[in-house]
Amino acid sequence: MANVTQTPLNPGDSPLVREALSSVVSRETSATQTAAAKSGEAPGGGDGAWPRPPKCRVIAVANQKGGVGKTTTSVNIAAALSMHGQRVLVVDLDPQGNASTALATEHRGDVPDVYQVLVDDLPMADIIKEVPDMPGLYCAPATIDLAGAEIELVSLVAREARLRRALAAFEAIELDYIIIDCPPSLGLLTVNALVAAEEVMIPIQCEYYALEGLGQLLRNVDLIKVHLNPTLSLSTIVLTMYDGRTRLASQVADEVRSHFGETVLSTVIPRSVRLSEAPSYGQSVMTYDPGSSGAMAYMDAAREIAHRAIA
């Protein structure tokens, strides 16, 4: 259930605004909770610890189109995995720092961040923070300084592999998953993520425009696989912002499934106001409102990912 007594991160909100935010209860949430109560199931599933992978899975969540749910997917998949016994690190590689915000990790001012790891060779262990009230979930924050990294990396040796080297030297925590939240571009930051990762997860919004840039992203993945990271593979596609009331959403979903087959998760992520509200409280939707349709969908998606065998 959502904790409606919490205060949003913005201290300037008036009591009236906070009350309005707290009182928003979507129909989807109450309907989902009612259905769960009737079936006797805990919201989000109560199947205990999921199987741990034989070695740490490094997953880059990438799509050069903005607004398709990369950060929302990264944060909530990570939170769902940690709630089921996995040790997960989220690397925020987006200068906007939205993943850091959603995980209540300070990323303003002089906070050590991913920029210093990539450009100044700061050890990854020096910037990682454990997420409050989420045992086993960690965050490597990003500040606005990261926006300059694209230019500064150009002159550095092995510029495409800076993140991979930093992660390889990081052994402070025995991790099961490293999830890298990429910026909405195909620049050096995203290239660093793809070189460091073994898997690519692509969130695709269920609208026509989301399909237009997909070809370029896949070509880049193939180029990186040939020249920089032969172990890279497209392991997962997540359909996001699905609106079952529209024919377009089902057409896009069908087209993606027909082309990519089992790479596409069977779970689709619906549009949900709770997914948008949760970051204002410094939370993932998994803790903000575990009974909402968005939380339950991400829980099912994370379960699929955890149980999938890597070819």
Image (cartoon, rainbow, N blue to C red):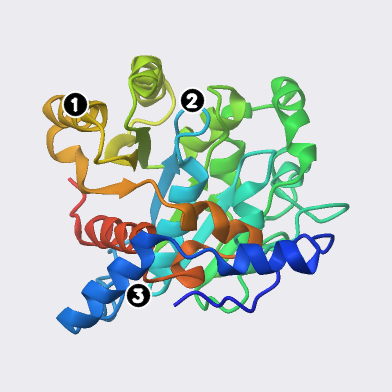
Q: Quick check: 24 left or right of 149?
A: left
Instruction: Return the residue at label 1.
Output: 251
Badge number at residue 58: none
Quadrant in which the N terminus is drawn: bottom left
| Furthest-right residue in this view | 110
What's the CA distance linking mark 3 and mark 2?
Answer: 31 Å
Instruction: Return the residue at label 3.
Output: 84
Viewer-proximal residue among 251 and 311: 251
Answer above or below: position of 12 versus 130: above
The amino acid sitting under disc 3 is His
Residue drawn at 65 percent across, 75 percent down = 6
Question: Quick one: label 3 or label 2, which is nearer the N terminus?
Answer: 2
The amino acid sitting under disc 1 is Gln
Q: Give neighbour class at mark 1: few <14, some 14-19, many 20+ (Cα, 10 Å).
A: some
**Residue 80 sits in quarter:** bottom left
Between label 3 and label 2, give the one nearer the viewer: 2
What's the CA distance linking mark 3 and mark 1?
Answer: 33 Å
Q: Quick check: 159 left or right of 306?
A: right
Residue 24 position in % (x across, y down): 53, 63
Answer above or below: position of 62 versus 283: above
What's the CA distance linking mark 1 and mark 2?
Answer: 20 Å
Residue drawn at 40 percent across, 17 percent down = 213
Residue 114 position in % (x across, y down): 69, 47
Answer above or below: position of 211 versus 69: above
Residue 123 position in % (x across, y down): 70, 55
Disc 3, SS: loop
Instruction: Return the residue at label 2.
Output: 65
